[in-house]
Amino acid sequence: AVVGAVGDGADYGFTKLIFDAETHRVIDGAIVGPSAGDMIGEVCLAIEMGCDSVDIGKTIHPHPTLGETVGMAAEVAHGTCTDVPPPRKK
């Protein structure tokens, strides 16, 4: 859970980024939940600039805020996120 979301009473929502398999650049994204409209601009800018998951992950995201979910989504894609549990082994 993102501390900023929990602190604001939000217990729903998600941030999803879609990356090109070859270039690793972000090609699409979606944000559902409180303040989604305030955060989608970062995803649009990342697409326009041709950012990859490393670029987004290295961008400073204030904590605790909902905006840090964009950085966390990029870190999950890159395999460097330390804020979520590892995926379950099959």
Image: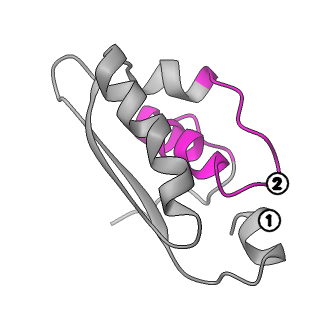
Say which residue label 2 marks. Answer: 64
The local secondary structure at tag 1 comes to: helix
Residue 80 is situated, as x and y percent measured from the top left of the image, at 57, 34
Marks 2 and 1 in Cβ contact (< 8 Å): yes
Q: Quarter of the image for the N terminus: give it.
A: bottom right
The answer to which of 81 and 66 lies nearer the viewer is 66
The answer to which of 47 and 73 lies nearer the viewer is 47
Q: CA distance from mark 2 to mark 1?
A: 6 Å
Is residue 66 shown above or below 68?
Answer: below
User: Residue at left 49%, top 36%?
Assistant: 42
- The region drawn magenta spans 58-82
Is residue 67 shown above or below 43?
Answer: below
User: Residue at left 43%, top 27%?
Assistant: 53
Mark 2 or mark 1, which has the lower sequence index? 1
Q: Is residue 68 magenta?
A: yes
Q: Is residue 30 magenta?
A: no
User: Residue at left 71%, top 63%?
Assistant: 2
Say which residue label 1 marks. Answer: 3
The local secondary structure at tag 2 comes to: loop
Residue 81 is situated, as x and y percent measured from the top left of the image, at 60, 42
